């Protein structure tokens, strides 16, 4: 992972937010691989909190989702030094472990999906990057760069 132009190589934060749309009903595993810290919320609930310096490791959590339903999702990440890594994947009913495709991400609220059509027309998540921001500092009120990211990897 590298931030967009204009973002410091180290001591930066990123916030990815929007909605993720499920396919079938059942248990989904969300995986985050990061070098340094992150927090993941799904359906407005903090499901993984690893807000500390660490080398690249993968964590996961299992959540039950309903068919073709959009859930709020937010991933906050910080990079203090060395390699910047932040990758968000999932697996679930009929889905092998993979980076979540942009078709299942929506940057802003959109109406509920037609349950007969689960593959979405999403375009990614809103990504806010905060340059020169150490992990111990709160997220600034205004991002250095705001863009839409098709995936988190």
Image: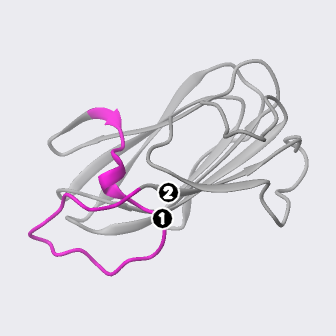
Instruction: Tell me the quarter of the picture where residue 7 sits.
Output: top right
Q: Which residue is mark 2?
A: 125
Give the image location of residue 36, x and y in percent.
72, 30
Label 2 SS: strand
* Dominant secondary structure of the residues highlighted in magenta in the image: loop
The correct choice, above or below, for 32 with respect to 40 in the image is above
At 66% from the left and 42% from the top, the residue drawn is: 38
Q: Which residue is mark 1?
A: 107
- 112 in magenta: yes
Q: What's the CA distance linking mark 2 and mark 1?
A: 4 Å
- Extreme-left residue of the structure: 116
Question: Mark 1 or mark 2, which is nearer the start of the sequence?
Answer: 1
Give the image location of residue 138, x and y in percent.
86, 56
Which span of residues is magenta-colored?
97-123
The correct choice, above or below, for 58 with respect to 74 in the image is above
Give the image location of residue 131, x and y in percent.
83, 44
Give the image location of residue 4, x and y in percent.
67, 40
At 84% from the left and 66% from the top, the residue drawn is: 141
Kindly identify which numbered label has been placed on residue 54. none
**Left or right: 46, with 140 as reference point:** left
**Left or right: 114, with 32 as reference point:** left
At 24% from the left and 65% from the top, the residue drawn is: 66
At 22% from the left and 66% from the top, the residue drawn is: 68
Label 1 SS: loop
Q: Are marks 2 and 1 in contact (CB under 8 Å)?
A: yes
- Extreme-bottom residue of the structure: 111
Q: Residues within 10 Å of mark 1 (few under 14, many from 20)?
A: many
């Amino acid at each position: 992972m590298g931030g967009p132009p204009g973002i410091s190589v180290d001591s930066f934060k990123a916030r990815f937010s929007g909605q993720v749309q499920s396919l079938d009903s059942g248990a989904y595993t969300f995986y985050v691989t990061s070098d340094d810290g992150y927090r993941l919320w799904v359906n407005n609930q903090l499901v993984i909190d690893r807000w500390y310096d660490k080398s690249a490791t993968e964590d996961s959590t299992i959540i039950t989702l309903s068919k073709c339903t959009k859930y709020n999702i937010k991933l906050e990440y910080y990079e203090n030094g060395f390699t910047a890594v932040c990758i968000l994947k999932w697996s679930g009913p009929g889905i092998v472990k993979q980076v979540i495709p942009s078709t299942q991400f929506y940057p802003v609220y959109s109406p509920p999906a037609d349950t007969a059509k689960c593959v979405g027309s999403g375009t990614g998540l809103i990504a806010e990057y905060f340059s020169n921001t150490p992990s111990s500092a709160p997220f600034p009120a205004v991002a250095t760069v705001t863009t839409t990211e098709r995936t988190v990897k």
